[in-house]
Image: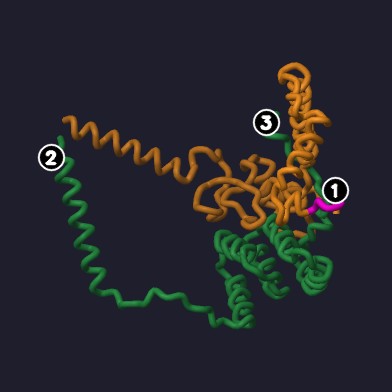
Chain colours: A orange, B green
């Protein structure tokens, strides 16, 4: 009994999955016209796969009537009808796909705002958070440090003492 | 319940295994090596022209070939394009014809100013005969409609 229940419910799930895999349950009465990218009934404007699996618009009576007219001579179609046929099958033209979105402006703007917030945080920390620098950072202390390094002949081969002439007592 | 499940799985696995044994013995051994296509450009053009020229071609096959062509590193020859347009005419799909012309234009890439006028000039008789408008004639060389932002719908 339990197993029969299990298998009948599994069969239901399987049926549902089959409908979902291809997306038949979600496309309304749109016409399926091809394989598309991966066999699913989905619409996407892609340059590398220009022909999706389904038409973009559902088959309304207007479009069905237009399709009947399409079976005749195409030279008798007006420009509006041609455009309507195109837009019934496809959402965007190639130029619309390639059109710039202007998104770079907001990206640059937001980036500048965030950077300026960081700079302000740094300035305020310097003003209100950190203590004064130690006295060894003063001009006199730094000069004294340099003098002492020369007296101790620090790094005499390539470094600071090699650039000091000890006989004349000045920089080379 | 577990027993029924196991029995079912066993029978499925056994039937598949038996099928596969039968199949593997009959398969001719092939080496899984890469091989380069020896098809010349002329053969390629003829193959696609013949494909589009088939009288009973349907929309699925047309779209398949067009998607394939859009994925290749080439611009289709004008004769292939003419054959494709005629195939669109046979299945009465005007939008497909215009979309294919757009795809061809997109395939011209950076040299669209050299290649695309030549293609148009070559396929002009077919265009006039079938009444297909080029994307330029339909005003699709410039963006016509803008999509609404999906986050604002």
Give the crowd class for mark 1: few <14, some 14-19, many >=20 residues within 10 Å: few
Location of the C terminus of chain B by quadrant is top right
| Chain of the residue on which disc 3 is drawn | B
The dot on residue B3 is 2
Residue under the image location 61 percent in, 70 percent down = B52
Extreme residue toward the left, this view: B3
Q: Secondary structure at mark 3?
A: helix
Give the crowd class for mark 2: few <14, some 14-19, many >=20 residues within 10 Å: few
Q: Which residue is mark 3?
A: B151
Residue B84, image x, y percentages: 66, 68
Residue under the image location 40 percent in, 44 percent down = A18
Magenta-drawn segment: A163-169
Vertical comparison of A162 with B77: above or below: above
* Structural distance between the alpha carbons of marks 3 and 2: 52 Å
Residue B13, image x, y percentages: 21, 54
* Structural distance between the alpha carbons of marks 1 and 3: 74 Å
Vertical comparison of A15 with A90: above or below: above
Q: Which residue is mark 1?
A: A169
Give the crowd class for mark 3: few <14, some 14-19, many >=20 residues within 10 Å: few
Residue under the image location 83 percent in, 71 percent down = B114
Residue under the image location 49 percent in, 42 percent down = A23
Q: Is residue A166 magenta?
A: yes
Residue A114, image x, y percentages: 74, 30
Asked if marks 2 and 1 touch (Cβ < 8 Å), the reply is no
Asked if marks 1 and 3 touch (Cβ < 8 Å), the reply is no
Q: Is residue A127 left or right of residue A15?
A: right
Q: Secondary structure at mark 2?
A: helix
Q: Secondary structure at mark 1?
A: loop
Give the mark nearest the N terminus, 3 or 2: 2
Q: In this view of the protein, can residue B145 be seen by the observer?
A: yes
Q: Which numbered mark, 1 or 3, is in the foreground of this view? A: 1
| Chain of the residue on which disc 1 is drawn | A
């Amino acid at each position: 009994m339990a197993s029969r229940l299990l298998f009948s419910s599994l069969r239901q799930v399987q049926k549902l999955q089959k409908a979902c895999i291809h997306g038949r349950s979600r496309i309304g009465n749109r016409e399926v016209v091809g394989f598309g990218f991966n066999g699913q009934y989905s619409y996407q404007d892609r340059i590398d796969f220009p022909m999706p699996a389904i038409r973009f618009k559902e088959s309304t009576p207007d479009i069905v009537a237009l399709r009947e007219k399409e079976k005749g001579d195409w030279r008798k179609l007006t420009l509006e009808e041609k455009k309507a046929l195109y837009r019934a099958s496809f959402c965007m033209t190639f130029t619309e796909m390639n059109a710039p979105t202007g998104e770079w402006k907001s990206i640059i703007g937001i980036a500048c705002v965030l950077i300026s917030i960081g700079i302000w945080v740094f300035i305020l920390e310097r003003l209100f958070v950190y203590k004064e620098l130690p006295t060894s950072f003063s001009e006199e202390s730094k000069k004294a440090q340099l003098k002492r390094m020369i007296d101790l002949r620090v790094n005499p081969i390539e470094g600071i003492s090699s650039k000091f002439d000890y006989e004349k007592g000045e920089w080379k | 319940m577990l027993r029924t499940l196991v029995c079912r799985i066993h029978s499925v696995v056994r039937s598949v295994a038996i099928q596969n044994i039968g199949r593997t013995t009959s398969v001719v051994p092939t080496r899984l090596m890469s091989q380069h296509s020896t098809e010349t450009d002329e053969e390629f053009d003829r193959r696609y022209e013949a494909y589009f020229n088939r009288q009973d071609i349907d929309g699925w096959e047309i779209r398949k070939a067009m998607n394939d062509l859009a994925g290749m590193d080439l611009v289709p020859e004008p004769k292939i394009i003419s054959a494709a347009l005629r195939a669109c005419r046979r299945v009465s799909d005007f939008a497909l014809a215009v979309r294919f012309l757009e795809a061809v234009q997109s395939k011209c890439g950076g040299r669209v100013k050299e290649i695309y006028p030549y293609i148009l000039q070559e396929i002009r008789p077919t265009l006039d005969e079938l009444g297909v408008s080029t994307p330029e004639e339909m005003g699709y060389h410039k963006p016509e409609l803008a999509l609404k932002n999906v986050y604002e719908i």
